[in-house]
Amino acid sequence: MTNQQPPDPATVRAVFARAARAPSLHNSQPWHWYWDGSEAALTVDSTRLLPATDAFNREQVLGCGVMLHHTELAWAAAGWDTRTSRFPDPTVRAHLASVRPVATHALTEPEQLLGAAIDRRYSDRTAMDPPSEWVTTPKVLEFLGHRSHTEVTFLDDSGVAELRRISELTTRLRRYDPKYGAELNWWSTGQDLGGAGVPATARPSAADRAHVPVGRQFPAGTAEPPEARADDAARIVVLSTEGDAVPDLLDAGYALSAVLLECTAQGLSTCTVSHVVEVLSARAMLADLIGHRHPQVLVRIGTACSPPPPRTPRRPIDSIIEMRPRHG
């Protein structure tokens, strides 16, 4: 075990290509990795920021937290144990974590299951039926959140009704923000996004969009259920943290990844909801709703009413990981 050779470059590329299926704000994929031959350093890619949507870069760090968890699972599913160091260099604020594969191991069934969940997971922005498995799922999701210092709060009917009002307020306020509108349109309809963005096939049609009242108002797409639907019946959970600093955001992203993949492994459909935490007044209202913690992101969880859309694009692997072997 102490003489374990590091993985070869082909394995490294395959692992990070799989981990890159991680979701992010507008599928912007705001992460960059540096591989030195034995360890990978995770940094925020400053060229992928969305200043009009995410003014404080909260969701970019959160997305990197999702990527970090996906990466650890992708290594595990490739048969490698890893050692992760968070914020290993306090003088470099953009260096969020380093992941070192340290030894090979026999693949376990849970690792195979979660690795396959990375491949299958997608953001279902259309209306959903209620989750088909919900007896034990809440306790499992709470456990996964607590492992990453994140509270998972389940909204009841009155909470969902209040969230709908908060979402409507956010949408109406954002109509008067032309920079936000331009950014949203560019990431939705841009012609040269380099394997990023949210294509029409992943966005609800104009008819179905109205049935998801807590969803972000993307430009109308082509995704819709095969038959007429009632309003969205997904359960909604809020992920929140005690603090609101960069480590808290990384924790919340890590927990978000765990929640999404557990739901996927259980055959449930999911979609993150973040527009209601991007406007300060709306975020404050949501904080009041859940008990004055810092809400970081929400998730809709249900049963899919439509077949999965085509896979959303991902950036070429060479654009997200820089191979810089260490020379003696």
Image (cartoon, rainbow, N blue to C red):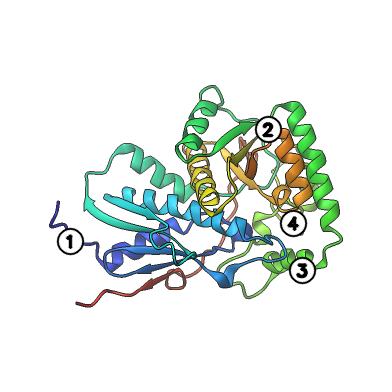
Between label 2 and label 1, give the one nearer the viewer. 2
- Give the amino acid at mark 2: Gly
Position of residue 90 measured from the top left corner of the image (x, y, whole percent): 43, 62
The type of residue carrying mark 3 is Ala
Tell me if I can see residue 287 in this picture: yes
The image quarter containing residue 18 is bottom left
Marker disc for residue 291: 2
- Secondary element type, mark 2: loop
Q: CA distance from mark 1 to mark 4?
A: 47 Å
| Quadrant (top left/top right/bottom left/bottom right) for the C terminus | bottom left
Quadrant assignment, res 27: bottom right
The amino acid pointed to by label 1 is Gln
For mark 4, does the 10 Å Cα neighbourhood hold few (<14), some (14 to 19), or many (20 or more) residues? Answer: many
Q: Position of residue 246 (x, y in %)?
A: 54, 54
Q: CA distance from mark 1 to mark 3?
A: 49 Å
Nearer to us: label 4 or label 3:
3
Which sits earlier in the primary sequence, circle 4 or circle 3? 3
Q: Which residue is mark 3?
A: 182
